[in-house]
Image (cartoon, coloured by chain):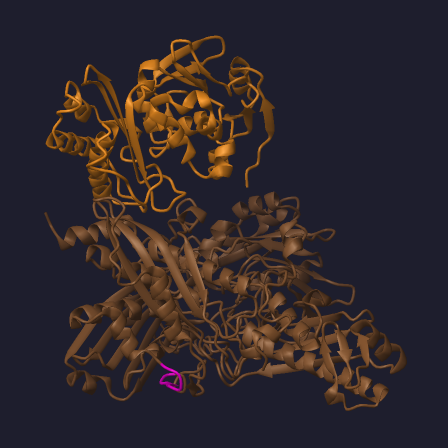
Chain colours: A orange, B brown
Amino acid sequence: MWELKEYRFAASAQEAVALMRQGPGTGAYIAGGTDMFLHPAECDFVVDINHAGLSDIARTPAGDLFLGAATTLHNIATNPLVADFAEGMLIEAAAHCGNRPVRSTATIGGNICNALPSADMAPVLLALDATCYIADADSQESLPLVDFFVGPRATVLEDRLLVGLALPAEAGTRRCASYKLTRSAEDISLVHVCVALGIEDGKIETARIALGAVAPVPMRAVLAEAQLVGQSVTEISPDLIADAAAIAAGECEPLDDHRASAEYRRDMVRVLTRRQILRALHDETTITKDSGGTVA
Amino acid sequence: MSDRKTRSAVGHNVDKVDAFKLARGEAVYTDDFTRTGMLTAKVLRSPHAHARIVKVDVSAAMALEGVIDVIWHTDVKAIAHTRAGQSYPEPSPYDTVIMPHKARFIGDRVAVVAAETTAIAERALKLIEVEYEVLPEICDMDEALTRTDVLVHEEADPLGIGGGGKSNMAAHIDKQIGDVDAALKTCDLVVERVYHLPRVQASHIEPHISIAWVDEDKRLIVRTSTQVPFHLRRILARILEMTESQIRVIKPRVGGGFGDKQELVVEDLVSVLALRTGRPVRLEFTREEEFIAARYRHPQRITMTTGVMKDGTMVANRMHVMADTGAYGSHALTVQGNTGQKVMPMYPAPNIHFLVDCVYTNNPISGAFRGYGAPQGCFALECHMDEVAAELGMDRLELRLKNHIKLGDTDPLSAKLGEGKEGLERVIRSTGLDEAIVKGCEAIGWGQEKKPSAPHLKRGVGMALAMQGSGIAGVDWGAATVKLNDDGSVNLAVGATDIGQGSDTVLAQFCAEELGIPTEKVLVLSSDTDLTPFDVGAYASSTTYVSGGAVVKAAVKVREQLAEVLGSHWECDPGDIVFADSKSTGPDGQTMTMAEVALFALYEAKIQPMATASHMSNESPPPFAAQFADVEVDPETGQVQVLKFVSAVDCGTVVHPRMAEGQIEGAVAQGLGYALFEEVLLDRSGKVLNPNFLDYKIASALDVPPLVTILVETDEPSGPHGAKAAGEVPSDGPAPAIVNAICDAVGVRNYRIPATPERVWRGIKEESPE
């Protein structure tokens, strides 16, 4: 049983950090609380950030997308500002995280800060070059999401607070496809693959292949990405795509656990990366539909 | 026997008697109840798979403010018993005591705390110091069978323990009809395969929970979520050294049981603590405890050896079941017995051999779970039929049609195999199996070419046939009391146990039918050992068929009493009076409403129209099911999507069509999980690796495909209004039908379930290495 001594509310990010450092004892930030109730933190108090003004979703005139850390996954999945961003890949990921009751309370910040290798939102955000905004007592800094994770359940935060994530307008125009492989419909991922391709003049200008649940942290397959850059969208060969997928499979570092073996996960990275590249290129003839899983 | 058109209640979708209060959240479960001064109990569980509990120091825990009592084995008399909720004498070994001297699995009871709050109880658990003498553990069932140097149970005289304290054998069966070895030599083809069944948990929504207190008459009252209130009272009386008259067991609404509550799981602990402290005590399992310390469907390894002639005639069939009962032998003999007895008669070959080796291990405990062994056996046999057909080059449907049991056939096994003794002969007096097969084939589109929805996918169909029983012949019985009230309503008191399956409604329908009143005029009380007559409880698919028979008899008796009263009032032959449409009508057109009859009986004739009747059947007519799956498989990932699932079920007369469909649909969802993703994983020392719904997946609404459910009605001569059972038979076929469909799609068979994406992927990879 979770024996908490004090429940504190913060009205702003700065106050949250101050309340965290006030002591006595150890504290933890809480927003949706879904992961925290699953794995109760050994802490004396929690700082609730649901009323700290961190629940907004905004688009700048230039098209950048900002997601407040305390925004629920359900809000992301249903917000019109997010709907057309990156061909809907963000709302797809948010809409297939946990189940409806969980999404109503779980937040994107919590999903990222818990830093599980299988965090559902992480690969999508990595593929879209998300930047993290982190509050200190009287300052704020930003950092690419790819540098945010330092290990399973570990981030750069320490006692600072993630206030939100920003996605550049350019990422919102990429061709995208993602797939979350699960055992049953409501499950955490065995393998999660997100592909986002920035196209200019018929050529792949930017390539992002982000992988979940196949390494100590959500990761990008940068060598595989490099294979795709500069390729013509119409003339790219299936062999090159298969090669890129095989490279991605080589880049990941999956573990054996009771959900799946490392061998299976690695091969699924290969299969699903190939399929998502094809789907992102709108090659519906090669792969028209995935079966079984949740994110089609 | 009237047909459905002339029946007023049976066969109609009346309102479920508890539907509105359930939907409004007003129905009262065990935990929707409190008593002043109620304590919470928590169990300290063994971290060792096998260890003597040498000493338990409870002093620090007792010193904690708010801790009222802590017990361990020195505090409770060790009276050997079985926790299996079965009829006396139970066919399960007496291998259990309330607080064991030796922990036999990771999670076995070591000490129990009663405290003012849950938080204090949990804190107290951490303060208990235990000295263990750790023993070598045995968690592999083959090792358990051969080794005698490590014994899970070495009790000197353990009543009914299979191995007699000299081996780890918990139950052994060896029954043969004809001579299988000799017959196999004469066959054109012999096919042998091995099938592996996982350990799965029932995952009922409401966990195990009990509240006990001592009332003002110094009686022990146990309010509990159970399927077997009367068996519980009997077992509690014995192990607490009390008499049944000193104990009252109350079963309120129950949020699912599926067999996992056909067992004493927490009731003894709250009872002991309530008696010791004089305070009410509550104990509720956490979900983790459900996975560690409740009961599982027995994991089994089944070897099928089948001999056939070229034309498909089955000549000999052998099933060898190797099963793991875990640390205790609850239902060890009978579940494994059912694996063959409920399944092999589907194809009554002249030579049948059924062998069981069920062993103790230091793993968590197996027990009863919907289907009671039959889902395991049905998986093996129905997969095997496809394998035999493939080897023969024969159509798999044709092979089944040629060999399946038919009307008038004698079940070859039932006389040989009863509940731990010789059974009774069973002749099939009603079967809708052929009609179920025809209708099921039509609904699934059997034999039609099915195109996958995308070029990279493969599509296949599969089928399975299943039969079960309706109660345990010659063993299960129940009683019912019907009492007429002034307004023409009746009280129906039954020991039969509604655990969510809807038996209160079905029994009310039988009562209403016989008295010619609407179902809502029947007030059902179930079950309370002080207030309702005996019933064995909700298990073995017995309630509609067995308890229903008792209700029909009791209601007929009341109707006859009323006819007597009216016969003398109207001066006519009581046999000429008709009870229908809430009134009684005499031969000369005299008529009285049921309320008028009741008032007349109570205030003029001055009798209480009331009767109790008991019912037992020496038959256990099988319900039949033909089930079909249409699946799509992604060969590159191993993912399986069930596109459609068809169940055609013969459960005799359908008493409540919508609830029968609900039973079948729920069974399919459970079977789908069994087929595709449910598996409790243990490490080498028997520690559960996935004791939660994050890691142990059950089917959600999103996993369940469109279901087609067809009720094939037959008229069972021995059943109340022609009814048979419906609750278990549809849980047998889903796993083999789905796995047969996967094999049809990709040409690779999963001999082991669940057929997870990785297992399907691996099977395909091994079949066609690159």
The picture quadrant where one finds residue B753 is bottom left
Eyeballing the image, is A172 above or below B753?
A: above
Q: Is residue B477 left or right of residue A226?
A: right
Q: Front-most of B197 and A227?
A: A227
Eyeballing the image, is A94 above or below B163?
A: above
Residue at point 32% right, 37% down?
Answer: A296
Q: Which residues are magenta?
A: B406-413
Q: Residue A177 at x, y = what percent?
A: 29, 30
> From the image, which quarter does the N terminus of chain B lie in?
bottom right
Q: Residue B463 at x, y = what percent?
A: 31, 65
Eyeballing the image, is A169 above or below A35?
A: above
Residue furthest front as drawn: B588
Res. B138 visible in picture: no
Residue at point 31% right, 14% down?
Answer: A170
Secondary structure mainly formed by the magenta segment: loop
**Magenta segment includes B651:** no
Q: Residue B325 at x, y = what percent?
A: 39, 67
